[in-house]
Image: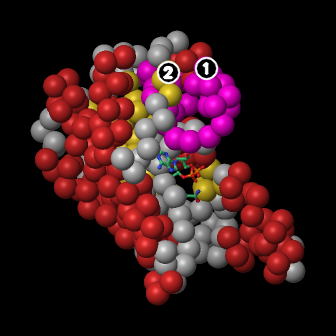
Amino acid sequence: FLQGKTAIVTGSTSGIGFAIAEVLAKAGASVVINGFGEAEAIEEKRARLAEASGAAALYVPADMRQPDEIAAMVEQAVAETGSCDIIVNNAGIQHVAPIDTFPVDKFDAIIAINLSAAWHMMRAAVPHMRAKGWGRIISTASAHSQVASPNKSAYVAAKHGVVGITKTVALEVATDGITVNCISPGYVWTPLVEQQIPDTMTARKLSRDQVINDVLLAAQPTKQFVTCEEVAAMALFLCRDEARSITGANLAMDGGWTAA
Ligand code: NAD
């Protein structure tokens, strides 16, 4: 149902972003993927997306810390595919440290990538969406858009901020056929998470199940990870016409974390 539409997914060379790019391509959209990684692996993914959609698939290595590169990526998408109908602000990084020793450069990078980039993406994309009378803006926020954990001051500030931008822009474009929403996952099962398990087992002398339930999933009442596919399915639904009334929302997918 997305034939003829173009989606830009930031931070889509791995994890949640790639899963979202894949479902959008399977629904027929041209996709622009973005993020860092090994050139060959990225090209393999880009080719897989082009095959899935039968439409264009571009890789644009714009650095989300650079506003001019973000604007140029949106313009390139429009120049090469004809439009920019869906944007998914997904690129994100984390750094964990107490406030008094939190490295300033890490704080600046987290705010730039996890927060400011979403603002720059929206600023560049909204005029193209308005011109078509249709658009979907989706940001991957986090349970940390609603609640805090110690030592994550930059990440929590950025994710709370994404919700603020989402609500504001949703109001600004409410009569233009454009919806603006966040998806807020709890702990998502990604290779990154999986790779932490053996080290934590050794360091804390715990079994695999104890690491998963008592360390990683301590805050998640279901004691189950969210999957990238679940997040992607929600993003895909938000692109449907049936989702036209969902706007300005922060949709929790956190196994009950923020209900507690
Ligand atoms: P990931 O590390 O697998 O993917 C992050 C992506 O962002 C990669 O493609 C990376 O190359 C890209 N990226 C990093 N810095 C960039 C930059 N300067 N410019 C462009 N791209 C850049 O992580 P993920 O778990 O898939 O996370 C995706 C999003 O989901 C993030 O915003 C993250 O905060 C959010 N999130 C993740 C979880 C989780 O448990 N994994 C939970 C809640 C929210």
Pick out the residue farthest to the top.
54
Above or below residue 65? Residue 55 is above
Residue 57: mark in rendering: 2
Left or right: residue 6 versus residue 75 is right
Residue 142 shows up from this direction: yes
Tell me: is circle 2 under 8 Å from ligand 1: no
Residue 218 sits above or below residue 74 on the image: below
Q: How many residues crowd mark 1 within 10 Å: few (<14), some (14–19), many (20+)?
A: some
The one of 114 and 55 positioned closer to us in this rendering: 114
Using residue 23 as the reference point, say whether residue 113 is left or right of it.
Answer: left
Q: Residue 94 magenta-drawn?
A: no
Question: How are the residues colored?
Answer: secondary structure
Residue toward you, 170 or 61: 61
Q: Nearer the viewer, residue 167 or 45?
A: 45
Could you say where residue 205 lies in the image, as x and y percent from the top left? 87, 80
- Whole-percent x, y for residue 36 in the image: 56, 42
Which residue is disc 1 drawn over?
Answer: 47
Instruction: Tell me the SS state at disc 2.
Output: strand
User: Percent from the top left, x then y, of residue 93?
Assistant: 52, 58
Tell me whether circle 1 and circle 2 mark residues in contact (CB < 8 Å).
Answer: yes
Which of marks 2 and 1 precedes in the sequence?
1
The answer to whether residue 245 is visible is no
**Residue that appears at 35% across and 39% down:** 69
| Residue beneath the point at 48% across and 67% down | 106
Structural crowding at the residue carrying mark 2, measured as other residues with C-alpha within 10 Å and reported as few (<14), some (14–19) or many (≥20): many
Q: Amino acid at mark 1?
A: Ala
Q: Secondary structure at mark 1?
A: helix
Q: For residue 68, which quarter of the picture?
A: top left
